[in-house]
Image (cartoon, rainbow, N blue to C red):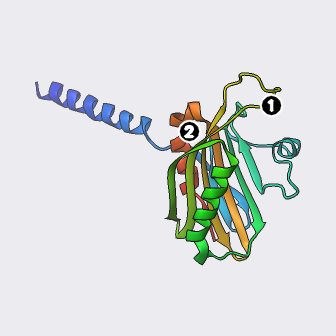
Amino acid sequence: MNSVSRFFRFVQLLGLLLGLLAFAGPGLQKTTIAKNLTMGVPDGFAPLPDDGIAAKYPAQRRPLAVFTSPSGQVGLSVSQKPTNFSNRDYAMLLKIYKASIQNMYGKVQFLREDIQTINKRDFVVLEFVSTVADNRRGGGNLAPIRKYQLVQYAIEGEQLYVFTFDAPASEQSKWQPVAQAAMKSIVMK
């Protein structure tokens, strides 16, 4: 009887351990983005080729890095641009970027708007679901495009770094923990 109860106890502990592993954080690969900047990129994501970056980000200043999921519907990007703001201006930047996001989209539901310390560095954090009309195919009665986005901003010297994770809003429950883990993995030295 004693060995039977130990066996059941072992099975219970094994079940608990497997359950915990099933809910462990998403897999991230530590990736160097630039000198003194690393972050975790979700497993399975691949760097977007130059022609893909040019098509998706048709700006004069290209992002430092862009990664996409195998389906191409989920993205992670890191960009950098000069700024006159300093890291003492984060409260003002939070208001400015929140207003900018509200002006950019037809509807925005903010999930989080905060200044958060991650790995000894402050970030402006905006997490939201955006809705915009789909006018790509000539109007009509197309459903609006809804996206889940997590955006973080940090200033280093005279540079503003912008970290953006976006996914279809219909897949928010799947990608939100991945986005949050990726953003919490950012290390700037």
Is residue 16 toward the left or the right of residue 28 in the image?
Answer: left
Mark 1 residue type? Arg
Mark 2 residue type? Trp
- Residue shown at 86% from the left, 42% from the top: 55
Question: Picture quarter containing residue 14?
Answer: top left
Q: Position of residue 189 (x, y in %)?
A: 63, 71
Q: Position of residue 101 (x, y in %)?
A: 65, 52
Structural crowding at the residue carrying mark 2, measured as other residues with C-alpha within 10 Å and reported as few (<14), some (14–19) or many (≥20): many
**What distance separates the C-alpha of mark 1 from that of mark 2?**
25 Å
Q: How many marks?
A: 2
Q: Is residue 30 in view from this perspective?
A: no
- For the N terminus, the quadrant is top left
Q: Position of residue 83 (x, y in %)?
A: 74, 72
Please say if 40 is above or below 4: below
* Local secondary structure at mark 2: helix
Q: Which mark is residue 175?
A: 2
Q: Earlier in the sequence, mark 1 or mark 2?
A: 1
Is residue 148 toward the left or the right of residue 7 in the image?
Answer: right
* Local secondary structure at mark 1: loop
Report the residue marked by disc 1: 136
- Residue shown at 59% from the left, 47% from the top: 28
Please say if 156 is above or below 102: below
Structural crowding at the residue carrying mark 1, measured as other residues with C-alpha within 10 Å and reported as few (<14), some (14–19) or many (≥20): few
Confirm or deny contact between disc 1 and disc 2 (CB under 8 A).
no
